[in-house]
Amino acid sequence: MPPPRLPALDDLDLRALRVIDALSRTGSITAAAAELQFSQPAVSQQLKRLETKLGLAVIERAGRGVRLTEAGEVLARHARVIVAELEHAVSGLAELSGLRSGRLRLASFPSASAVIVPELLKRIRAEHPGLATSYRELEPPQAIDAVRQGDLDVALTFSYPGDGVGLIGESLPGLRVEHLWREEMFVALPANHPLAGEARVSLAQLSDETWIAGCPRCRGHLVAAAESSGFTPRISHETDNIVAVMSMVAASLAVALVPRLAVAAAQSLPAEAVVLPIREDNHRILSLVSPLSAGDAPAVAAAREACRQLDPAMWHLEYAHQPATPRSHR
């Protein structure tokens, strides 16, 4: 070992600092090599080269393994800070590059298309004008499959409690699910219906009615909610078009279970139809779904942050983590 001399900045390189940092945290050359995806000889060579440049021993034998010397400990403490800061710098540069030239492929369901998605894309474009965005309208099962297959970056979806699709109370393998907002369900009735003047209605009061149902998931929720109220709904009309739903209701052809966003998407209700709150708790959860493999990819992170910045009160929604608003049982 050459005599000690005053170390210089040129004696240190990033690879050597990463090796010292990993060795300090893992406790062995084998573990450090595995973490860095280096070979063990490469790690040993880095350490020898570092000791030669510094003129100081940074490791010493300890039984069958090695441990850091006092000089090694000093270097490791600073290496940890330097490596962490450089990792942050690389992430920042990647984010900057990604959002200037990247793309975001988004999908959502029809009622969100009309009210939430325009505001969401507007916000993303304002914050990241270089990010190319595209949008597809898909029901949740198709949107989730597209995210899983890599055809989409993110999907704004909905699920009902207990519908068994994995968005509430279960995990979706390979996907990250962030619950955003809680959306209340309503009943649409003809304005001349005997219950039209009530403040709230119970589904059981509508057991003899003819119903309109939409997508398979919405239909499944209607059937489950009705059965929990003691009846099986008689479904004679099927459409996802909220304008058509409300027109059928206004014509006294049937009644319907409608989410708040769909009512907002209709913009104005026919004079011959009314929408009433449901006495029982009846809601769905809106969630953002993205691939776990995307991690904090710039475009996905931009969509996630834009969703967090939206005010759900704009559409009379609540944050998903908030308790349900207490209901009056009039």
Image: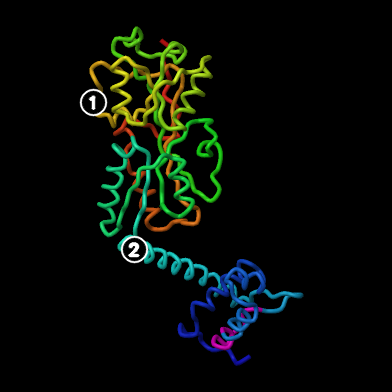
Q: Earlier in the sequence, mark 1 or mark 2?
A: 2
Apparent side of residue 160 relative to residue 67 in the rendered image (left or right): left
Secondary structure under badge 2?
Answer: helix
Instruction: Confirm whether the magenta stretch covers residue 196.
Output: no
As drawn, the residue found furthest toward the bottom would be: 2
Q: Nearer the viewer, residue 6 or 133?
A: 133
Quadrant of the image for the C terminus? top left
As drawn, the residue found furthest toward the right would be: 63
Q: Nearer the viewer, residue 322 or 21?
A: 322
Q: Which residue is pictured at 41% across the width and 24% down the height? A: 325
Q: Nearer the viewer, mark 1 or mark 2?
A: 1
Apparent side of residue 253 relative to residue 75 in the rendered image (left or right): left
Question: What whole-number distance in Å separates the C-alpha atoms at marks 1 and 2?
Answer: 42 Å
Badge 2 amino acid: Leu
Quadrant of the image for the N terminus? bottom right
| Numbered circle sitting on residue 268 | 1
Magenta part of the protein: which range? 50-59
Q: In the rendering, at what x and y percent does residue 253 appear?
A: 34, 16
Q: Indicate whether 209 appears above or below 319.
A: above
Q: Indicate whether 110 appears above or below 68.
A: above
